[in-house]
Amino acid sequence: MKVAVVTPYYKEDLQTLARCHNSVMHQSYTQVKHFMVADGFPKNQVGAWQCEHITLPNCGDVGDTPRVVGYAVASARGYDAICFLDADCWLEPDHVETMVSVMKASDKAVVTCPRNLYELDGKFLAVDVESDGKQFNDTNCYLIHRNAYPLIHGWITKPLGEGLIGDRYFWSEVCLSGVSMARSLKATVNYTTSFAFHYKQHGLPVPDHAKVIANLGDGYKTYNHKEISA
């Protein structure tokens, strides 16, 4: 099974992108290729890496269109399954191998997994309790088989201007489709979080820099958590 890992990137620094890319390059599963899709701000250095580097104009939807473009190219190249990986996230070395094993053993078209949360300073926070594969599943925690590829179009059929909650729309599409799903029990995705509710969920003090996503009547936007609680 050939697996494509699709990463949209925007203005992330090169060190962050390298961490993401190296985590894909060092997978124990060998039939994997990294597709890195520049959302309007391509970095020349990325073009020299061992990846498929795709450049687009800025699409303005928080990476959703670049995800679909990366998937489309991978599908055309004959890849059997897709993972999505945000540029500021990284994978454990056995992530793809574990997800493929669960997919093969269960014969399901979609596999989900837990994620590890890290603070901005790199300190481990907790295994996330929000992305549980029941109420919600994070963008980075899917393996999607070719049989379920039509679901991926959901990334660009959501209402315009709601890219900040595109992951919620996609999860809803997956659930409503009735597609068969299986769950890996291993947290093999690492996610750097600045969201206030992750700290609150685990009974930790909320950092000053923490943010929330809210719709205050003019669409979904990101705010410092103190702006909302004031």
Image: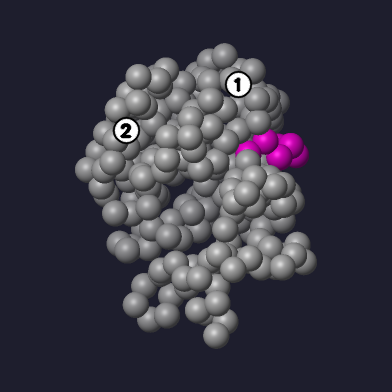
Q: Is label 1 in a helix, a strand or a loop?
A: loop
The residue closer to the viewer here, 210 or 92, is: 210
Residue 107 vs residue 21: left or right?
right
Q: Is residue 8 above or below residue 45?
A: below
Identified by mark 2, the residue type is Lys
- Pointers 2 and 1 in contact (C-beta within 8 Å): no
Range drawn in magenta: 180-189
Magenta region includes residue 185: yes
* Residue that appears at 25% across and 38% down: 56
Q: From what the image shows, is residue 85 above or below residue 44? A: below
**69 displayed left or right of 80:** left
In the rendered view, tell whether residue 100 sits above or below residue 204.
Answer: above
Asked which quadrant contains residue 108, the reply is: top right
The quarter holding residue 150 reads top left
Labelled disc at residue 87 = none
Q: Residue at x 67, y 25 (%)?
A: 94
Which residue type does callout 1 highlight? Gln
Identify which residue, 207 or 35, lies in the foreground: 207
In the picture, the disc for residue 43 is 2
- Res. 129 in view: yes
Q: Which residue is mark 1?
A: 27
| Label 1 packing within 10 angstroms: few (<14), some (14-19), many (20+) | some
